[in-house]
Image: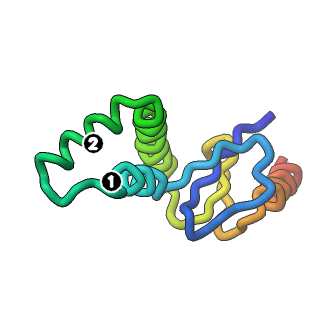
Amino acid sequence: MAETIVVTDSRHPVTNTGGARVIELDRAEQLTRALSVGLPANPRLATITAKKRLSSAEGRRITAELRRAYQDIADAKGLQVQKIPAVVVDRTLVVYGLADVAEAEELIDAYQQGAH
């Protein structure tokens, strides 16, 4: 089975992703904003509160998700995606602008059938 990677963001939702890996380019930004919600205006108190949040189970989960989100961004850069949404199959074939991943995979499959 071919590897499918979808590169998008929260403003360009995709459907019918099946087993595709979905990379949301703005996920790290969303997680960072969520971590800062309700922090005190006082920098010293904000630092204390943030440290408590990060050491909690939820904070550790968000930190792990942030690591994945930044790795996703690096992976998307490596794919040299030019616009979103992008459906990339086997890291070589790409369909831009289709939000329906299954439809994009079908287009790629049809191309491959005709090209070989």
Label 1 neighbour load within 10 Å: few <14, some 14-19, many 20+: few
Near mark 2 (Cα within 10 A), the count class, few <14, some 14-19 or many ≥20, is some
Give the residue at mark 2.
50
Q: In this view, does 36 lie to the left or right of 99?
A: left
Q: Nearer the viewer, residue 80 or 67?
A: 67
Between the residue at mark 1 and the residue at mark 2, the CA separation in whole angstroms equals: 8 Å
Quick check: 61 left or right of 96?
left
State the scheme by which the image is colored. Answer: rainbow
Whole-percent x, y for residue 1 in the image: 81, 34
Q: What element carries label 2?
A: helix
Amino acid marked by disc 1: Ser
- The residue depicted at 36 percent of the width and 57 percent of the height is 37
Residue 26 screen position, x and y as percent: 46, 58
- Return the residue nearer the eye: 76 or 95: 76
- Disc 1 target residue: 36
Determine whether, in the image, residue 29 is placed left or right of residue 106. left
Q: Which residue is drawn at 28% across and 54% down?
A: 39
Q: Do labels 1 and 2 touch, CB within 8 Å?
A: yes
Residue at 46% in and 29% down: 57
For the residue marked with disc 2, what is the amino acid?
A: Ala
Residue 19 x/y as whole percent:
76, 41
Camera-side residue of 79 and 111: 79
Residue 66, position as x, y percentages in the image: 42, 41
First in sequence, mark 1 or 2: give its number. Answer: 1
Q: In this view, does 39 lie above or below 64?
A: below
The reply to whether residue 35 is visible in this rendering is yes
Q: In this view, does 77 lie above or below 67?
A: below
Quadrant of the image occupied by residue 67: top left
